Amino acid sequence: SYELTQPPSVSVSPGQTASITCSGDKLGDKYACWYQQKPGQSPVLVIYQDSKRPSGIPERFSGSNSGNTATLTISGTQAMDEADYYCQAWDNNVVFGGGTKLTVL
Amino acid sequence: EVQLVESGGGLVQPGGSLRLSCAASGFTFSNYEMNWVRQAPGKGLEWVSYISSSGSSIDYADSVKGRFTISRDNAKNSLYLQMNSLRAEDTAVHYCARMGLYGSGTMDVWGQGTTVTVSS
């Protein structure tokens, strides 16, 4: 079965750029999307089709996908961005990465 | 307002059954594919099941195949998950999620989740 691998944790200072990676075999040949989940809340879609932002998602969220790696980038990271982030792709069915806890400190 | 509201969770003994429901509002439910996704305590997201907009195509994760049944009633704007032969490892928050028009399984609307606890 297809697997997506994310680092368990990433730390970033406020105002700096955070990058969260998601690796999978030939992931660049598929579309990747990203969800943000804050404690006690449901996931929220922040990036779809590799790099597109749904309405209401701040411009500081961006994405890319090439080769075996998709990347979620948060520019000018704010304290409110502290959350778990999950990548997701499609390989006959929905596949999630294991999630990355983003700490803003 | 586009909304999904789950219900039906609770405490059940191993081997027992539960039926989860998801009520949709604010959009044309019959136009959208739907999923159930779950999250065990302190763990990541796990896809559970998929159903096409008409209900004619269905799929399950290996972990629930043969035990869970997904269904929908487009006339009632509702999605269901019948869960049988429940195990301790099924303990999780269960979310229903709408597959948006972006393709590739992308889920653009999520419910608040309903908690299933399997314990004796």
Image: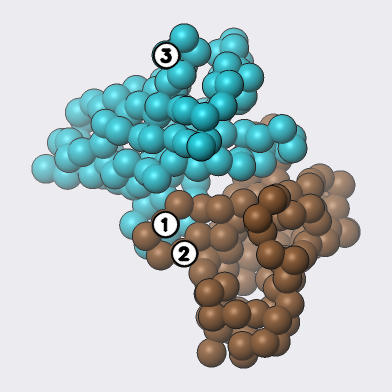
What colour-coding does the image apply? by chain
Question: In the image, what residue type sits under mark 2?
Answer: Lys
Image mark 3: chain: B
Residue A71 placement (x, y as % from top left): 76, 65
Quadrant of the rendered image containing residue B57: top right
Vertical placement of A6 versus A54: above or below? below
Q: Secondary structure at mark 2?
A: loop
Name the residue carrying label 3.
B76
Q: Colour of chain A?
A: brown
Circles 3 and 2 on the same chain: no
Name the residue carrying label 2.
A38
Residue A13 placement (x, y as % from top left): 62, 90
Name the residue carrying label 1.
A41
Question: In the image, what residue type sits under mark 3?
Answer: Lys
Residue B102 placement (x, y as % from top left): 74, 37
Vertical placement of A102 versus A22: above or below? below
Is disc 2 surrounded by few (<14), some (14 to 19) or many (20+) residues within 10 Å? some
Residue A6 placement (x, y as % from top left): 63, 65
